[in-house]
């Protein structure tokens, strides 16, 4: 330990033991524990205690007057004691004078009024968790009655305490079985240490209990055990307890089903247990005993397993497909769609669940759709995948929900009555429908998909969230549409879908609900990004009112919509698809360019989202060579930076520096990747000299902005400015020193201004700069060191243990003036 820290430690321990002193906050105590943990892991804990007896005195004070101390100090002391006792020699040292038994037994906080505080109970558990690192800890825990207390804390009112108690039981069981008594050939639970046997007997009693809380606690402990402990003793533990687990399946309904599913999957994933046949048989039995809703998570978990037997995989697939198979059966008089596993269409339990109540039906369908969506994205996805049957089933579900289906049976009519208008099922079905676009389907089914999506997008009863999901699913199906051979344009079916979709989008852009307008704009942006250069899309879009409506939404009363409108108009303009506003309702906008309008948004919009969107659009325009920018890039950058440098939003300022960096790259003849379909691509500029680039940047007054940003209170802005100036400094080195910079310009006034800015005095202007002065300042600045500093955490200036101790003492006035290092 550092000598200065040792000098400060007695005073700190006295403060912690004094109830009259204000207690340090939890953050300081956690940092203090982290420091002690570092010390004990690096060396001898016993040596630390002998060199700093004040620590032992603090622990004894906890025993003498626990009622005088705050709960957080008591918790801190218990955790500290456990941390030092983790080393066996230090454990024996603290046993002298019965310190540890009195701290963690009935004589300590456990038997006092302080035990009512969850913080103290949590500290007690964490202290024992740290202490239990060696075999000597096991008899100590048994002697002080700690194991029984841990059992009771499993049902604690604090979820954190209850969870920590269960994890501690797992740790103790693993510790006990890793250190079997001498003379035993291998670790066996039945003849293991007394502590292990006590825990196992407690688990057995809990598994036999009729009380759901105790049963759930035991299942959770076993789940953690088999998930984290892979010793040779775990098969014996499962062999002993599995009959009790299987016995739970005989009850109706199966109790604690969620915890039971987690346990069985944990056993199946265990590398020690999965090679045996017992877990697979138990999983198959469980699938048949659980209700359809309960069996869904188990079936999905089984299908994720690597070495699962094929028969079990087939059974699990059938569980997930059963609800949709029942939907298809209810919708048609004939046999179900081919492609579903045998037995999936006739499961009476699933049928009963679907038609028992609206909540049960909705819950089952939502779970099935969500599980199948996840399953399709996995490498373990069943093969063959019943794509056609699933497409038809999802379309049928969606039509049941919006009332457009014509049921052919009484079951179908009943199902339609349950599902009509159900937003939960609509959202789940649309999500799954979008995922199904990754696989091909027959043309007639794809046509049905397009039709049902149009029904939802045009339906007056579709909620904003359902419309958003429908837009997303439509985009995914359009992206997956086959391309015309020899052409990158959309195929005829997708173009027809698009022609029918744009009038619906036009209607939604006029919706009174801002969420709907926003979703429509996001959909339009994605379409323009993917197909802006394709003739079929351009023709359909320009024949509609969508570009004009999009531009009108730049003045929407909702800031999120304005931001989305900025992004959409910027994307449309990049492809030459924007429309100038015309008509008597906008007489002042007829001659106003989109560039001027976006600059107006950047300068005047009261919300940050639209301004950020403008800066992103302008950066893309500059990078891609937009026609309006290519006419005079320097004037464009000057107008944008004039507004961005004064913006109060740090993201706008940071994006302004990013735009400046793109412009600098282009000045030096190193433009970024350009869009091959840009409206007007300027010719690649020849590599300009550094002097010419610096002259342009000085005319833009970029360095006033960049140097101020170096000392910005928002770190991302300072980092972006540092990157820009480092890039320029590196280019100066690669180009060599220009003739006009070989002198030594006087930069004392510039450096003085920068020092004032760094001190927070931002009212002083930098003045006009010449290129030679700029380069002299850049060479004199340690930009590399500043970059490293900005990359560090916010408390990097001083976070030493000595500083922590000084700050904690300063809060109670123990240190004299100017002794604390408050950071």
Image: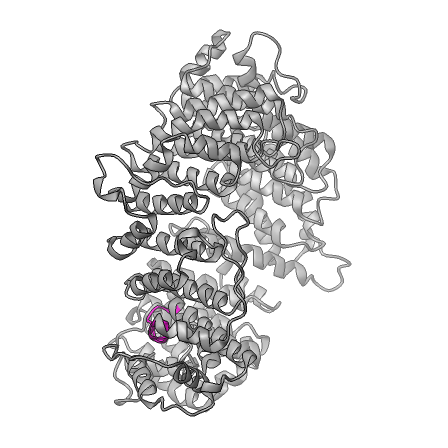
Check if residue 291 falls in the magenta segment. no
Q: What's the coloring here? A: one colour
Query: Where is residue 694 shown, x and y percent of the image?
Result: 43, 76
Q: Residue at x 58, y 21 (%)?
A: 445
Residue 380, percent across and down? 67, 38
Q: Main secondary structure of the magenta part?
A: helix
Question: Where does the magenta region start and end?
Answer: 701-715
Camera-nearest residue between 751 and 245: 751
Foreground pick, 370 / 687: 687
Residue at (38% x, 82% y) in the render: 803
Which of the image's four quarters has the C terminus?
A: bottom left
Task: Tell me which residue sits at (42%, 38%) in the image.
Answer: 524
Left or right position of 200 against 554: right
Q: Could one spot residue 36 in this view of the protein?
A: no
In the rendering, at what x and y percent does residue 325 appear?
58, 20
Residue 148 visible from this viewpoint: yes
Location of residue 268 with respect to 595 vertically, above or below: above
Please tell me whether residue 2 is drawn above or below residue 315 in the rendered image. below
């Amino acid at each position: 330990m550092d000598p200065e820290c040792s000098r400060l430690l007695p005073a700190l321990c006295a403060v912690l033991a004094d109830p009259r002193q204000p207690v340090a906050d939890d953050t300081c105590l956690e940092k203090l524990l982290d420091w002690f943990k570092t010390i004990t892991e690096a060396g001898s804990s016993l040596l630390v205690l002998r060199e700093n007896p004040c620590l032992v005195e603090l622990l004894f004070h906890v025993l003498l007057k626990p009622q005088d101390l705050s709960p957080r100090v008591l918790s801190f002391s218990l955790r500290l004691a456990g941390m030092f006792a983790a080393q066996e020699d230090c454990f024996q040292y603290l046993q002298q004078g019965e310190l540890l038994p009195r701290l963690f037994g009935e004589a300590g906080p456990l038997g006092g009024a302080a035990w009512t505080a969850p913080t103290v109970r949590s500290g007690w558990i964490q202290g024992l968790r740290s202490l239990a690192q060696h075999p000597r800890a096991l008899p100590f825990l048994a002697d002080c009655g700690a194991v029984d207390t841990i059992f009771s804390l499993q049902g604690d009112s604090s979820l954190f305490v209850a969870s920590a108690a269960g994890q501690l039981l797992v740790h103790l069981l693993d510790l006990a079985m890793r250190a079997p008594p001498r003379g035993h050939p291998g670790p066996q639970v039945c003849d293991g240490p007394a502590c292990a046997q006590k825990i196992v007997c407690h688990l057995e009693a809990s598994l036999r209990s009729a009380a759901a809380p105790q049963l759930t606690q035991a299942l959770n402990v076993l789940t953690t055990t088999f998930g984290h402990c892979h010793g040779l003793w775990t098969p014996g533990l499962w062999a002993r307890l599995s009959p009790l687990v299987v016995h739970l399946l005989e009850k109706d309904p199966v109790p604690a089903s969620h915890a039971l599913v987690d346990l069985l999957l944990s056993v199946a994933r265990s590398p020690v247990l999965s090679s045996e046949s017992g877990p697979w048989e138990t999983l198959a039995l469980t699938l048949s005993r659980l209700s359809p809703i309960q069996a869904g998570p188990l079936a999905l978990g089984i299908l994720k397993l690597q070495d699962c037997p094929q028969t079990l995989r087939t059974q699990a697939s059938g569980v997930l497909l059963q609800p949709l198979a029942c939907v298809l059966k209810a919708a048609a008089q004939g046999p179900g769609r081919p492609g579903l596993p045998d037995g999936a269409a006739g499961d009476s339990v699933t049928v009963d669940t679907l038609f028992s109540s609206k909540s049960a039906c909705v819950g089952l369908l939502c779970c099935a759709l969500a599980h199948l969506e996840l399953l399709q994205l996995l490498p373990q996805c069943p093969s063959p995948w019943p794509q056609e049957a699933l497409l038809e089933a999802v379309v049928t579900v969606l039509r049941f929900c919006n009332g457009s289906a014509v049921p052919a049976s009484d079951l179908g009519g009943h199902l339609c009555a349950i599902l009509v208008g159900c937003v939960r099922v609509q959202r789940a079905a649309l999500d799954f429908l979008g995922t199904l676009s990754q696989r091909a389907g027959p043309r007639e089914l794809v046509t049905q998909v397009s039709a049902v999506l149009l029904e939802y997008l045009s339906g007056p009863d579709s909620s904003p969230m359902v419309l958003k999901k429908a837009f997303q699913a439509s985009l995914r199906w359009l992206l997956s549409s086959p391309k015309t051979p020899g052409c990158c344009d959309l195929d005829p079916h997708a173009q027809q879908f698009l022609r029918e979709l744009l009038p619906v989008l036009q209607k939604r852009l006029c919706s009174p609900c801002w969420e709907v307008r926003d979703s429509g704009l996001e959909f339009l942006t994605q379409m323009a990004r993917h197909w802006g250069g394709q003739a079929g899309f351009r023709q359909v879009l320009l024949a509609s009112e969508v570009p004009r409506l999009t531009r009108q939404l730049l003045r929407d009363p909702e800031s999120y919509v304005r931001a989305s409108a900025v992004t959409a108009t910027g994307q449309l303009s990049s492809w030459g698809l924007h429309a100038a506003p015309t008509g008597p309702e906008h007489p002042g906008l007829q001659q106003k360019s989109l560039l001027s309008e976006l600059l107006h948004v950047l300068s005047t919009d009261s919300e940050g989202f639209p301004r950020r969107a403008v800066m992103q659009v302008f950066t893309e325009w500059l990078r891609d060579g937009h026609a309006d920018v290519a006419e005079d890039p320097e004037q464009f950058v000057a107008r944008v930076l004039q507004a961005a440098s004064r913006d109060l939003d740090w993201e706008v300022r940071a994006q302004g520096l990013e735009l400046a960096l793109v412009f600098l790259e282009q000045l030096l003849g190193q433009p970024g990747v350009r869009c091959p379909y840009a409206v007007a691509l300027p010719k690649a500029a020849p590599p300009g000299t550094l002097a010419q680039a610096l002259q342009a940047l000085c005319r833009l007054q970029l360095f006033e902005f960049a140097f101020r940003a170096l000392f910005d209170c928002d770190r991302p802005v300072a980092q972006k400015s540092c990157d820009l100036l480092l890039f320029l400094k590196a280019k100066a080195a690669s180009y060599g020193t220009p003739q006009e910079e070989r002198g030594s310009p006087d930069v004392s006034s510039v450096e003085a201004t920068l020092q004032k800015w760094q001190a927070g005095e931002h009212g002083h202007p930098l003045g006009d700069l010449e290129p030679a002065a700029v380069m002299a300042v850049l060479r004199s600045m340690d930009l590399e060191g500043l970059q490293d500093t900005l990359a560090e955490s916010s408390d990097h200036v001083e976070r030493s243990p000595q500083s922590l101790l000084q700050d904690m003492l300063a809060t109670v006035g123990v240190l004299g003036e100017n002794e604390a290092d408050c950071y």
